[in-house]
Amino acid sequence: MQKFKSVDELVNQLKPTEPVYCIRRNSLRLASKFFQNKFPGKILYAVKTNPHPVVLQTLLDSGIKHYDVASIKEIETIKNLNPEIECSYMHTVKSREDIKEAYFKYNIKTFALDTKDELIKIIESTNHAKDLRLFIRVSVSNEHAEIDLSKKFGAITSEAAGLLRLGKQYAYKLGLSFHVGSQCMHPISYAKGISEIGNIIKRTKIVPDIINVGGGFPTIYPDLVPQSMQSYFDEINKGLKNLKLQKIPEIICEPGRSLVAESGSTIVRVNLRKKQKLYINDGTYGTLFDAGTPNIVYPSRVIKNGRVISKKLTSFDFYGPTCDSMDYMKGPFILPNNIKENDYIELGQLGAYGLTFRTQFNGFYSDQIFEVEDDPIMTMYNKETMKEFLVA
């Protein structure tokens, strides 16, 4: 992969006519080391967030040895990196064929579920295996999340209690898990989730071997500035202490966005300006999906490329290159007032989901990917924190 010292250097040399995606290995290393040093348990990277080989290899080299997968394809991707890497199949709805292949071909022992029917599928598809690690996913409030995941997955407390009792008969190790929703903006959600786990423990008198606090850890956007990541870990520690158990179970988490968001950015070019609307060469059918329906506002900056940029700033909204009017990003994206056709814009925090959501709709697709060494536009980690954890 070709490497540049900065996005500006890349644009000045290549003058790309198609969207370009940039990967920052240092950002990946920093976030990885921070989680490994500060989170009170094991880290499972959520592969769905960004399965690019460079991203996966960098996380692996940085010390993350466990991966949260949701499909056979994701398992194949990880096992191709290293057959010994441990994968946990945390999707709660799987076909019998996929369960069987995961267990017998790829030696996957860990499966999540939120219904009795799914438990039966797992037991039967693994031929009543005696070495299963089963996680009962509990539905918890997603009130502080930007993207609510509670409607599709998770068993309510009364159902989860029954599944825990049933699962204990079949599991070598038994876990309880929850997910507070994507881009969770308040750490209290984790304490509430752990409290719900405590209610199930009290009801069943069963202490799980493992508690999985899921993902949802946030990154920073111009209009979404979370508390420090440490405050999330502090809230988790406080919630675990409040369980008042003689021995705290093993703790795991499944971060995605918070590990990789800062590592990626997309360089787009302006095709046309209509007053405060910019028509750019990437959009919601490309790397910018989250800027559409969820209306996530990415940090943005104009790449000067040798010309004078106005100090006066204006709010813009974006339209992507396809013929679909839904290819629209409301923003607001704050950019210099004199921006015009052929100007380049860098959009940050695209390490999370930017690559995975791309389509080839209308024939617009770019797979130009390069490595850059400059800092991301926005970060949750200051320079001193970076020094501490990159050395660690």
Image (tube, grey):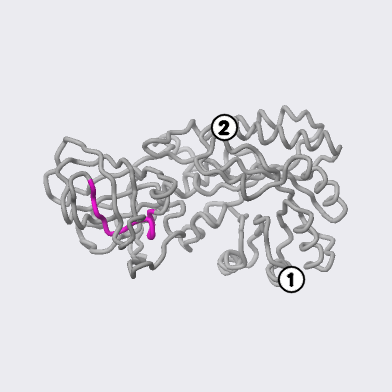
Amino acid at pointer 2: Pro
**Can you tell which quarter of the image residue 332 is in?**
top left
User: Helix, strand, or loop for circle 1?
Assistant: helix
Left or right: 310 in relation to 266: left
Q: Identify the disc placed on residue 187.
A: 2
Q: Nearer the viewer, residue 17 or 25?
A: 17
Amino acid at pointer 1: Phe
Residue interval drawn in magenta: 277-288
| Above or below 222: residue 272 | below
> Residue 36: x percent and y percent?
58, 43
Left or right: 127 in relation to 55: right
In the rendered image, residue 250 lying in the magenta stretch gets the answer no
| Above or below 307: residue 314 | above
Residue drawn where x is 40% and y is 39% of the image: 221
Residue that numbered label 1 is attached to: 104
User: Helix, strand, or loop for circle 2?
Assistant: loop
Q: Nearer the viewer, residue 303 or 357?
A: 357
Residue 26 in sight: no
